Image (cartoon, rainbow, N blue to C red):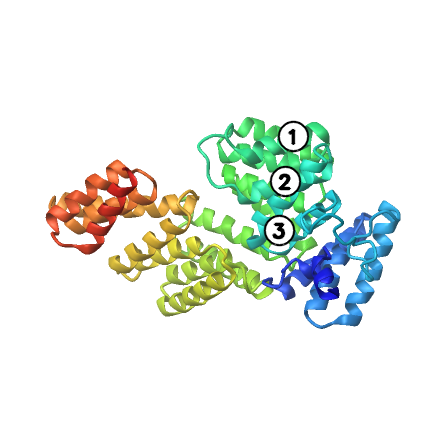
Amino acid sequence: MLLAKLRQLECHFTWALDDTDLTYLQHRLKNNIELAEEEDRNIGWSYSNQAFTKYMQGLLEEARDDLAKAEQHIREQHGDNYLPGQAGGDKKKFPTESPSALHPEIYGEKGRSFLKFSRQYYEKAKECFEKALELEPEEIEWNDGYAVALYRTESDLTSLEESPASKQLRRVLELDPNNAYMMVLLGLKHADYKKYQKAEELIERAMELEPDKPYMIQYVAKYYRKKGEVEVSLSLLKRLLEKIPDSPFVHHQLALVYNYKIYSGQNGGEEADALLRLRIQHLEKAISIKPSFVYAMSDLAACYAEENNLQKAEEMFQETFKVATANNDNLHVVNLRYADFQLYHNKSEPLAIKHYKEGLALQKNTAEGKKCAKKLTIIANKHISRNPHDGKAFGILGYVHEITGEKPQAIECYEKAILYDPGNEEYLNALYDLCLSLQ
């Protein structure tokens, strides 16, 4: 009975947060606390999260110390009504109606924790904030968290108007007009859709409000990189690196800037080689700080391929596949990069096709998924232009149309694939399933 009640107790220790890179998270929380202390702002939540990471690592005395600090800081800001993460758990009430009937503050803290701990929990964070908003729809903190969760989980959309994240960001700014964080995220959303004038207005206003905050500088640097003003982005990131030298994300952003400079066509020969070396240095540093950084790992593998170290690239890709699979993190990105590696460096089209297909099937609506579909279409059309009776090429097109939901086109392509490759079970089964789904 006691064990059952303890499992209903809502806190970090019952939220199944164990699939997290705790060493890196602890490092990041420590940086957050140091920066918060410099800026004299509340750090209770960071101490609470840090206590959990230490508990998971068996550092019980240190965890208790951090919980005491969390209690002190949260008490100073919120008073005695609500002390999430408190050592004794005395304010973490047992559910009075059912395990799903919780106070909005509990849903909110749960959502914040899911956002903080790992990308794989972002969807859960979104659900928590939705539940908190059902109970307190005007609460700025829950609206803010929900906007961040939507921003981080949103796939590519055709227009700014149909973006739920953009709508929610505007909602927060209605409630909290001087929220610089929401401004800069909304600015980046506008930049995604090439609406640079409005993006610039939002970014400039956000910088006026909070010009020295590291997160602000990082997002503004990202904006200028997306806009193509890479020297501005580079200057901001170098300035930020002096403030937070152990941020894997800043190192990754610097690598992306150097990548942009390489492929802008303005740098060639020795200068391009020097930029590639800088790119590799920053990616290696990012991974040394955060060994589970899948984006940086796949970028680094691609860099090794670009400097013609194919064995090292293959080893890095295989390690990245392991991490991405274990953490269920951006596997579609790794498949795309590995397919490119096979196609352009190893000259293995069959392996490239295999991994483009896997990337498309995993995340068809993301930028990477769409790139996989485009690459498969290019490969198939190339073969058909050489041989109009190439059944395999029509099979590839059929697969692309099937995964992207274009069933009539998929059926047409599979029929041609079977015509030119009679008896192929893969195409026959796909065609049968498609026809059945239309009945």
Q: Amino acid at mark 3?
A: Lys
Residue 388 % position (x, y): 12, 44
Check contact, mark 3 vs mark 2: CB within 8 A.
Answer: no
**What whole-number distance in Å separates the C-alpha atoms at marks 3 and 1?**
33 Å
Name the residue: 65% across, 30% down. 171
Amino acid beneath label 2: Glu
Q: Which mark is residue 130?
A: 2
Mark seen at residue 238? 3
Residue, x 76% and y 57% (percent of image)? 48
Give the mark nearer the N terminus: 3 vs 2: 2
- Judged left or right of residue 142, residue 257 is left
Disc 2 to disc 1, C-alpha distance: 14 Å
Mark 2 secondary-structure assignment: helix
Element class at badge 3: helix
Element type at mark 1:
helix
| Residue projecting furthest to the front | 1
> 55 or 62: nearer the eye?
55
Q: Quadrant of residue 190?
A: top right
N-terminal-most mark, 2 or 1: 2
Please give the count of numbered marks on the rendered protein. Answer: 3
Residue 228 percent coordinates (x, y): 49, 39
Q: Amino acid at mark 1?
A: Arg
* Above or below for 234 versus 202: below
Label 3 or label 1, whichever comes before in sequence order: 1
Q: CA distance from mark 3 to mark 2?
A: 38 Å
Give the residue pinned by disc 1.
Answer: 171
Query: Of tags 3 and 2, which is closer to the observer?
Result: 2
Dot label at residue 392: none
